[in-house]
Image (tube, helix red, strand yellow):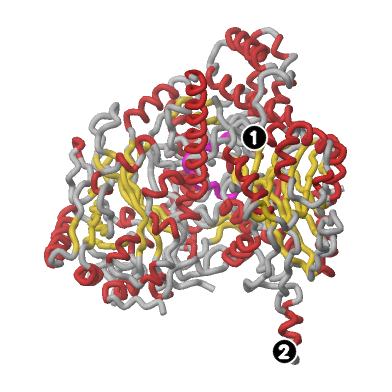
Amino acid sequence: MTKVLDLLDIQGNVIKAYGRFSFPCARYLLLRIHHGERGRAFVAAVARQVTTAVTWGDGPGQMPKPSATTNIAFTFAGLQALELPEASLRGFPPEFVMGMKARKAILGDNGPSDPEHWDPVWQGEQVHVFISINGQQPEYLEQRYQWLLGLIAQSEGGVSLLHGHCGDNGVADLPYQPAQALPENGKLTSKEHFGYTDGIGDPVFEGLPGPARRVEGRGKQTDKGWEPLATGEFILGHIDEAREYPPAPAPLSLARNGTYMVYRKLHENVGSFNDFLDREGSRYPGGREQLAAKFVGRWRDNGAPLADAPDTASKQDWDRRFAQAAPAEKDRMLSAFTFDHDADGAKCPFSAHVRRINPRASLQTTPGAFDTPGALANRRRILRRGLPYGEVRDQRRDDGNHGIIILMMQADIKRQFEFVQQQWINYGNDFRAGNDKEIILGNHDAEYPSRAVLPVAQDSDQAPYFLRNIPRLVETRGGDYFFVPSMTALRMISEGSVDPT
Amino acid sequence: MSNIAGKAYAMSVITPIRWYMAWINKLFFWIAQNRSSTLKGLITLSLIHYARWVVIGRRQFPHLHPQQPKEDLRYSYMLFFSNFNGSWDQYVDSFTFSIPSGLDLFWKWNIRYPNSVPLTPFHEYIRYNQIETTHYYSAYPLASSNDIKAAKKVRQALLDFETQSQQAPEQFMQGYQAMLRHVQNDLGDMRPTPIVSMAANQVEKRRRRDIRKEHERLAALREERKHA
Amino acid sequence: MPDKSGNVYALTILSPIRPGRLDEVAYADVVRSRLDAWNFLENSPMAKVPQTYLCRYFVLDDVFTQSLAGGDVFGPLFDFLSIFSDRARRRALPREDHLKSKYLVFSCNFHGDLDNYLRSMWLAAGNEIRHAWEFCYAFDQVRNADDFVAYMKKCRLKASLFFDGSNDDPLEEQLKALYLKQEFGKFVVEHQGLPAEQLQQAYREFIARAEPANLAGPSWHPGQYRLR
């Protein structure tokens, strides 16, 4: 049976990565609620412009694509400020109640990533509301922003916009976090500042609109091939991979079709990255660009997966086929790979980004050992949204204003985001790699210098290559946990009519 | 109390089973012990140092002294002891994700066992019947079960290579590289474990603070004695 | 015998605690706080006991009455019978069971055979053992290692299934292997890319320093939780 989602009830950013729907620029706003009733009136006004997940089209009866989108989410403190009933509040999971800062020991946000170094907007008074605006053009973004400023002004002090996002030249007074797709040769790309293509392998789940073929490589690996993941892994009020409704606050209408969002501002140390790549690339037998591919598991130029194109020769062949392929086939070539023929990591290392965040079926090291091949990966998947921010003015420096804003959606922050961050990014035991961390995102520090192995095939005559003294390439500069309500729940929250009894 | 010793977590669970069903459980355990394929899932999970299941008949609780009252129980009990790596959630979740039928086979005969899928009732069942450890010791807090298995392989490789290491430099190099290929995925660095839970974080902080205080106290005492 | 898998032994001890009190603290709680105090020492007393891989201590106060919803092998049958008789329905509800004594539980995994292990446990940590077991029934008659072995055997429960997810090497071999894995890992990265001759020289020096075959040479010590 094909599941049909109520797309008019789900917020659009849950289902759509706007960047891929020609909304290349965004502003992320953080607000504080000072007065329950006026705060709810403000939320009601915003709710009327919130973009749903409905499929856009130009045909009769279809919703045309908007010029700008708006979405909204709340921290636990925000829901408290909006005066949700205590019984509903108590139904939220502990990690959401605590918020990201309090979870720093779990997340490995230490050293330069410690919350004390985060942008000023995250210091002091707690953030209550997140509002994102995405625009097809900068002017549409500005229009929508001005509209929102108007609503804030009309709230009579009910809500205020928090300033203190860090921008260029270390100045930290921005009233919003700007973000935009990066241009390359005058064309917008899906790349981030290290030069990798981002967000290729977003999970596909039951009910997600789109062609069925997209499930290949993005769903779950089963004995029968690729199948979509259960909806409840990403959206509350739907059955998940354990055949149950994800734990959620009462009443059902508050949780159903909502989800949790993790916001993280990640600064990219471009100078350290380039230095490291130069230093190791000059010694690594495969050369600098192949080394860059080993860090992530994909080649930087076109995203070719190492699992299918592990070296220069196979990459040339892959490129040739890719150039001739139709768009659907191109998409398949980028996503539909497995690690089934790479048990020892000779193609894609165990510490590479794509293998750490989604090991697919490769943790079942003995065929047939588990209930389903992807057993250990299927409940750790995350929908990834967001865009890069800032620009790199000097490739040799770390201290510019550049990084990515990553927004991650899932039904269970602890089981999904926190688990991946702790066990797979900052630790390596599941990959039988001791404490070795993920190369790009790992919280490497000088006290215990990190290393990673780039294995070679057993039948080759080469030696494995060991990376050493991996610098901290990415630093956390802010973030929190948000609840993304459905449209129904948003109206209930703004009317003050949430009733768990 | 602490269920955690470095990279190992001690889980102890005690669950009732009808005394006349205990034999069937023992039968399945016997089959599992004698047919290696039954435990393939457990081995592949590779999170466990050692685990055991002990079935206590309702009249088999140790009785040591005439003054000790004899237990008078309606049920027999199954004790499960596991030493595993990672957090409680990771362990319990990994089990239900990957070997749900194996879990059911071992626990099915216990009173009110809810099955391993869905997850929440299973979580509740384990939490409900789990006993916290007061003192837990590991001989290798810095190592996981995977580290120990990898270490054995590395040591063997070094011992085997001993004879080759005396050859001419070129042959040495070939042999050395072959040895590295053999152990390339067994050399992961070992360090203290990441904090597995906020509670563990608190315990660790308190422990460090207390150890520090104790050291300060002893230092002060020594200082006092010196002057005395 | 499922208590043993190769050379690793799974020891399960339940020692009944007497019902008395020390001042106003019940014996069982005194036992608990004595065990808890071990957590604040530099290392566990069990680190002194040769061949101990992992072990835990706790006090079992009582068994749990199953009140959560859950499945049951006999569920459908009881369900069916309860249509005809309310008595059958009630009989199908889980019963309440209670232990008459509290038990000190010691669960241990070690290398080697039981008698030797218990004997060396007594010799290595006799004071701590006496302290922990002091309030158990009949322990006052334990005066020497032989008594202790005999006592523990009376408290022992046999495992129905024992799973070894690690290996059964002697502890010194496991620790030596871990040391070598860590040191060789460092060696490999520090000497990567050296010409054959220099590498060979460095490797010889490494072997001379690390002594892979010599268990008495440099190694990790039991319970080591810091790297330096």
Q: How many marks?
A: 2
Decide which of A176, C153 is in the foreground and name it.
Answer: C153
Query: Numbered disc 1: what chain?
Result: B
Q: Residue furthest front?
A: B228
Q: Give the residue number, with chain letter if any, for mark 2.
A: C86
Q: Height in image: A280 above or below B138? A: above
- In this rendering, position of residue C226 left or right of residue A119: right
Q: For numbered disc 2, what is the local secondary structure? A: helix
> Residue C175 appears at what percent x and percent y?
68, 29
Q: Height in image: A165 above or below C213? A: below
> Residue C75 appears at what percent x and percent y?
72, 77
Residue under the point 54% across and 41% down: A307
Q: Is residue C43 magenta?
A: no
**Res B7 seen here:** no
Circles 1, 2 touching at the beta carbon (< 8 Å): no
- In this rendering, position of residue B203 left or right of residue B141: left
> CA gap, disc 1 to disc 2?
56 Å
Q: Which residues are magenta?
A: A346-365
Q: Give the residue number, with chain letter if any, for mark 1.
A: B140
Residue under the point 82% across and 54% down: C160
Q: Height in image: B167 above or below A456? A: above
Label 2 Cα neighbours within 10 Å, binned few <14 / some 14-19 / many ≥20: few
Residue type beneath disc 1 = Tyr
> Residue B191 appears at what percent x and percent y?
55, 33
